[in-house]
Image (cartoon, coloured by chain):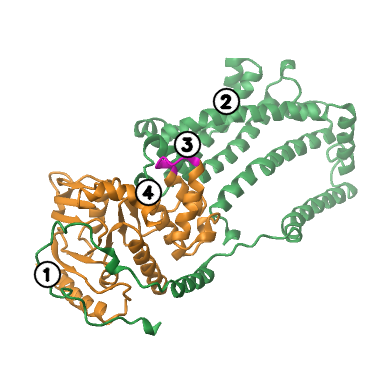
């Protein structure tokens, strides 16, 4: 299953040795008078198959950075390359189209990708069962719970058959138990496929629970402050002592970073 | 659940990797096998199934009996009450019999028309005009609405006029239309168009304005840009506002057509409902006048109930936008 999902994209990436490369990327908003630097000289590689969490307080430009990688916006300086093609993007809101059923939402992505009509239905069913929603094909969006909607949104993102999945705080609006379950699901799907994930969050424990590498961004402007490699074996649980210990350390760092803004 | 605790000692390099130097070029493909979770799937899928069952929204459909009780009984009661009050007023001689015909007199006028065989031709003359005019208004109003919604210059130029036209009763156009186009069908259609096009265009503009920007962003990430974005994302997302505009557009079409038929009189136009009503007034046939008013009302309601209300209900219900679907 993993082979069929991203094999073409993975082959393209193997030679590139990265799923995304950000090279001295800066982003400023506003005109010459009130120009505000949001991201300052970000250099970051995401390796093929790697799971990276971007962590930062408000105002660190996390979402701006994801928009740049997704190609929804252009950097003011520097370059971004994603050899696996247009990255898939998942939002905090499910952003599913309410005029389509769960299955048809996925099929629209397949159709825009150019998949022939006769293969779409089967592929949509396969993706839905990958997120364990095998029976939800004909369900309308409003008939699904919050957690189910995010799983359909994940299946829709996977339908892009992209090597790189960008996630913008996708579980922030869910209750704790549902979020916990979705962490498990995401870890499972990530490990079963060749997918690279760039995951933005302000939740330290979530970052430590999920990522192989946590990158801490400073705020205003966003700069890469520090990063941690996490070798705690999966499956981790959010309440694991090792996860908690590292979270305490990273939280201290994050607090120090936030405090710095109050001093001047 | 408690048994899932893992070894609390972190793997090598976890805490001390944070040496402050960003690690670029993380090297070749990482080995995911090391991170592959143990096959503990059953526990997770069971938990997930439980969450899904607890959270999912169940939608109940009303039974036929409930529909009869809640949707059919109230309006039937109201109609029967009106007929009773009407008949009582006739029996109580509230007004002169030439001014207030009884329900049965209106009924026999209806039977006369039925027997004379011109009932349906009268209705069809007006209805075909109304529907044809409405379809023309649809064909003009839809691209016009798209233009106003998506091209800032066009919006600034004619947007305010378009919404202002909605408050101008289209009867006001009848004298001008008659002078320009003569007392012919084309004058009727002109009046219908002037009434319905602004409603339809404005409905579409409002629908497009209310599309959440998130849908457009989500559409762009999956490759729906330009015309494909308009067709697959923008138009379906704007459908509720568009359908509301169509509904109002039909009401305006029908209203302005009846006014035009009442005012403009010519043998070329044939006898529609408006002309029938005016003929009855000229003959001081009060039962006929009542019948004319009732027929105009019934046709207007019937088209709304048969076409526009089901369309609107379907659009809203399929998106979970009606109160009953929650």
Q: Are marks 4 and 1 on the same chain?
A: yes
Q: Chain of mark 3?
A: B
Judging by the rendered image, the residue that carries numbered circle 2 is: B173
| Residue A24 locus on image (x, y percent) | 12, 51
| Residue B146 locus on image (x, y percent) | 44, 34
Q: Secondary structure at mark 3?
A: helix
Q: Are marks 2 and 1 on the same chain?
A: no
Q: Residue at x 49, y 35 (%)?
A: B201
Where does the magenta region start and end? A111-117
Displayed quadrant of residue B178: top right
Residue B14 on the magenta segment: no
Earlier in the chain: of badge 2 and badge 3, it is: 3
Q: Chain of mark 1?
A: A
Q: Are marks 2 and 3 on the same chain?
A: yes
Q: Nearer the viewer, residue A75 or B17?
A: B17
Mark 4–mark 2 distance (CA, rounded to whole Å): 54 Å
Chain drawn green in the picture: B
Displayed quadrant of residue B283: top right
Q: Chain of mark 4?
A: A
- Is B48 situated above or below A194? below
Q: In the rendering, which numbered label is found on residue A160?
A: 4
Q: Secondary structure at mark 1?
A: helix
In the rendered structure, the answer to whether residue B198 lies left or right of residue B306 reads left
Mark 2–mark 1 distance (CA, rounded to whole Å): 70 Å
């Amino acid at each position: 299953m993993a082979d069929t999902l991203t094999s073409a994209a993975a082959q393209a990436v193997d030679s590139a040795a990265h799923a995304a490369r950000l090279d001295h990327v800066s982003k400023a908003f506003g005109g010459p008078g009130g120009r505000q630097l949001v991201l300052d000289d970000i250099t970051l590689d995401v390796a093929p198959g790697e799971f990276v969490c971007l962590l930062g307080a408000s105002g660190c430009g996390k979402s701006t950075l994801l928009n740049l990688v997704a190609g929804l916006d252009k950097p003011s300086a520097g370059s971004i390359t994603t050899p696996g093609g247009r990255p898939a993007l998942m939002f905090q809101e499910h952003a599913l189209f309410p005029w389509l059923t769960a299955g048809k939402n996925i099929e629209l992505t397949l159709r825009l990708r150019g998949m022939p009509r006769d293969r779409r239905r089967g592929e949509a069913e396969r993706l839905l069962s990958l997120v364990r929603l095998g029976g939800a094909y004909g369900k309308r969006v409003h008939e699904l719970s919050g957690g189910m909607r995010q799983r359909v949104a994940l299946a829709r993102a996977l339908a892009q058959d992209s090597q790189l999945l960008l996630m913008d705080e996708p579980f922030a609006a869910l209750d704790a138990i549902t979020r916990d379950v979705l962490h498990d699901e995401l870890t499972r799907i990530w490990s079963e496929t060749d997918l690279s994930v760039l995951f933005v969050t302000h939740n330290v424990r979530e970052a430590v629970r999920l990522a192989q590498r946590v990158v801490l961004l400073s705020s205003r402007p966003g700069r890469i402050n520090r990063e941690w490699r996490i070798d705690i074996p999966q499956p981790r649980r959010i309440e694991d002592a090792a996860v908690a210990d590292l979270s305490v350390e990273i939280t201290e760092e994050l607090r120090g970073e936030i405090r710095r803004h109050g001093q001047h | 659940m408690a048994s899932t605790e893992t070894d609390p000692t972190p793997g090598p390099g976890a805490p001390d990797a944070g040496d402050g130097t960003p690690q670029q070029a993380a090297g070749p493909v990482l080995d995911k096998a090391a991170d592959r979770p143990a096959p503990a799937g059953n526990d997770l899928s069971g938990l997930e199934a439980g969450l899904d069952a607890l959270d999912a929204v169940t939608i109940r459909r009303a039974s036929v009996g409930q529909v009869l009780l809640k949707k059919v009984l109230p309006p039937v009661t109201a109609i029967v009450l009106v007929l009773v009050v009407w008949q009582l007023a006739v029996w109580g001689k509230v007004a002169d019999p030439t001014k207030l015909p009884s329900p049965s007199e209106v009924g026999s006028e209806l039977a006369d028309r039925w027997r004379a065989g011109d009932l349906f031709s009268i209705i069809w003359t007006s209805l075909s005009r109304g529907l044809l005019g409405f379809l023309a208004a649809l064909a003009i109003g839809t691209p016009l609405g798209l233009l106003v919604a998506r091209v800032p210059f066009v919006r600034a130029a004619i947007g305010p006029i378009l919404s202002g036209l909605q408050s101008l009763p289209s009867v006001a156009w009848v004298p001008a239309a008659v002078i320009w186009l003569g007392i012919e069908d084309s004058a009727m259609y002109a009046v219908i168009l002037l009434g319905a096009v602004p409603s339809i265009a404005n409905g579409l503009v409002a629908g497009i304005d209310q599309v959440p920007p998130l849908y457009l962003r989500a559409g762009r990430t999956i490759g729906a840009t330009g015309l494909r974005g308009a067709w697959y994302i923008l138009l379906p997302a704007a459908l509720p506002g568009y359908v509301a505009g169509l509904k109002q557009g039909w009401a305006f079409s029908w209203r302005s057509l009846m006014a035009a038929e009442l005012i403009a009189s010519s043998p070329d136009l044939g006898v529609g409902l408006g002309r029938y009503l005016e003929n009855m007034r000229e003959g001081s046939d009060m039962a006929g006048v009542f019948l004319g008013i009732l027929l105009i009302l019934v046709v207007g309601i019937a088209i709304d109930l048969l076409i526009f209300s089901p369309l609107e209900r379907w659009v809203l219900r399929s998106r979970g936008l009606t109160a009953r679907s929650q």
